[in-house]
Image (spheres, rainbow, N blue to C red):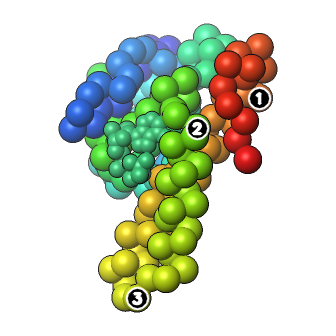
Amino acid sequence: MAKTLKVDVVTPEKIAFSGEVERVIAPGIEGSLGVLPGHAPLLTELGTGPVVLKRGGQVIELAVSEGFLEVMPQKVVILAETAERAEEIDVARAQVALERAQAELECARDRQQHAQALAAVRRAANRLHVVEDYRKRKPERAGRLPQVH
Ligand code: ATP
């Protein structure tokens, strides 16, 4: 059996990642979902969370929000509303977005406003979480990124 699988992480704006990996971990709506080469075909919904790709001791992590994961015989496609690699995340922007969304959550007047604010909190918190993980893995590069509070 092949030792790697092709993975494409795609949004309406861009291809956030495309390449061969040994393992995919994605944020299923009922918990984290792992995919190895030879996995049975699958189509499932994704929530907002980290996508972790492992390849030869290397870890590539992306912050992904809402989408689908499809496992096909030859490849895995993650189609998401947004996806950023850890190195691309603007920390200051995510912090501002988190504070704004938390304030919106507190004064939400109906279910729709509440759901929108909660989704925005999750997107921003996920981006900050992915940056934190990246810093832990690559402390030598952490100096280049502003602190996450
Ligand atoms: P903001 O209020 O800062 O726009 P948001 O969660 O509402 O945050 P999204 O609607 O999820 O933003 O994303 C809009 C676009 O901006 C997408 O292309 C997404 O990849 C990008 N983006 C959002 N936040 C960041 C960030 N902190 N760093 C890098 N790219 C980001």
Circles 3 and 1 in contact, beta carbons < 8 Å: no
Q: Earlier in the sequence, mark 3 or mark 2?
A: 2
Could you say which disc has been placed on residue 109 in the image?
A: 3
| Place of residue 69 in the rendered image (x, y in percent of width and height, measured from the top left) | 34, 43
User: In the image, which is nearer the foreground, mark 1 or mark 2?
Assistant: 2
| Place of residue 141 in the rendered image (x, y in percent of width and height, measured from the top left) | 70, 16
What residue type is disc 2 on?
Val
Give the residue at mark 1: 136
Q: Earlier in the sequence, mark 1 or mark 2?
A: 2
What residue type is disc 3 on?
Arg
Query: In the image, ligand 1 is in what quadrant?
Result: top left
Element type at mark 2: helix
| Place of residue 91 in the rendered image (x, y in percent of width and height, measured from the top left) | 58, 38
Element type at mark 1: helix
Cα gap from disc 1 to disc 2, whole angstroms = 15 Å
What residue type is disc 1 on?
Lys
Is residue 3 toward the left or the right of residue 139 in the image?
left
Q: Is residue 105 above or below residue 138?
A: below
Q: Residue at x 44, y 33 (%)?
A: 84
Could you say which disc has been placed on residue 13 in the image?
A: none
Element type at mark 3: loop
Mark 3 Cβ and ligand 1 under 8 Å apart: no
User: In the image, which is nearer the foreground, mark 3 or mark 1?
Assistant: 3
